[in-house]
Each structure stands twice: as C-alpha cells, then as structure tokens.
Amino acid sequence: MSVCPPYAPFFGFAGVASAMVLSTVGAAFGTAKAGIGIAGLGTFKPELIMKSLIPVVMSGIIAVYGLVVSVLIVGSLTPNNYSLFAGFVHLGAGLACGCTGLAAGYAIGLVGDSCVRAYVHEQKVFVGMVLILIFGEVLGLYGLIVALIMNTKATTVDGVC
C-alpha cells in the first residue's frame, strides 16, 4: 500500500474554509440587504417590523448549512491515512455548500429587500414574499444535501491512497 501524500489534508481544510466562508458571506449579504429594507419599512410602519424579519432569519440559516458541512468535514480529517481522493471530495463538498450558500444569500437579500419595501404599501405581498424566499433558501439546502452525500462517499473510501 502506498503512503498518503502529506499535502492531502490541505484540500480537506480548503473545503472546510470554502463551506464556512462562502456560506457566511452569502448569509451576511442577505442579512445586510434585507436589513436595509426593514430599516426603510420601520420609518413608515413600525408595527410590520416583526413580520418583516423573515428574510433575515432565512439568511442566518444559510450560515448554519456551512457550519454543519464544515464540522462534518473536520470530523473526517485525520493526519494519517487521509487520501488525496478524500481531500478532493471534501473540497468539492465544501465548494458545493459554500457556492450555493452564497447564491442563496444573495437571492434572499435581494428578494427580502424588494418585498419588504413593497410590503409597506401592500400587505397582500407577504405570502408571495415568503414563497419566493423559500425557493431562494432551497438553493442552499440543495448544496447542503450534495455536500452531505459527497462527505459520505469520501469517508467510505478513506484510507486508500
């Protein structure tokens, strides 16, 4: 049996960083963008602020997806017998979760800002806003599912260099 390359864990840690950083940037953008809309709404109708916090909560969930994937990948990282295959699979899993989290946070932020501003003038837009936000959130959930499947594949073949 061949010796696993000593640089293989680098790719696993790059996957951890990708999942955590990219999904958190997406969540931060979504929170900031939706927060701007909520601040604008609060000056006209402060009683609607609590219902308008939905985009901010949904943006925060995106960061949790990245955290879950990062913790799972770190749990499978071992200094010895960590194959290059496992490193690349973990990198791919981190990128899948991180990139979809970035896209989902961007979508939630834009939709949240626009719909919260429209909610000031017409309260019937609330149900449509929630539905659109759910579809934006599902983008991040798809990345989480793909990352979980990839992590499972990396751990079943792990140890083979």
Image (spheres, rainbow, N blue to C red):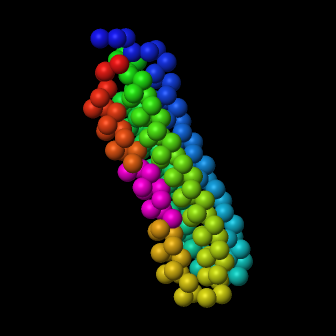
Image height of 77 relative to 131, above or below: above
Query: Quick check: can you spot residue 80?
Result: yes
Coordinates of residue 59 in the picture (x, y in percent): 54, 59
Secondary structure mostly seen in the magenta stretch:
helix
Q: What segment is highlighted magenta in the picture?
A: 136-145
Displayed quadrant of residue 150: top left
Residue 93 versus residue 51: which sits nearer the camera? 93
4 on left or right of 18 = left
* In magenta segment, residue 144: yes
Coordinates of residue 27 in the picture (x, y in percent): 57, 54
Coordinates of residue 16 in the picture (x, y in percent): 49, 35
Coordinates of residue 52 in the picture (x, y in percent): 57, 73
Residue 34 versus residue 136: which sits nearer the camera? 136
Query: Quick check: can you spot residue 47?
Result: no
The quarter of the image holding the N terminus is top left
Image height of 39 relative to 24, above or below: below
The residue lying at 40 percent from left, 44 percent from top is 147
Displayed quadrant of residue 44: bottom right
The residue lying at 66 percent from left, 63 percent from top is 33
The residue lying at 29 percent from left, 29 percent from top is 157
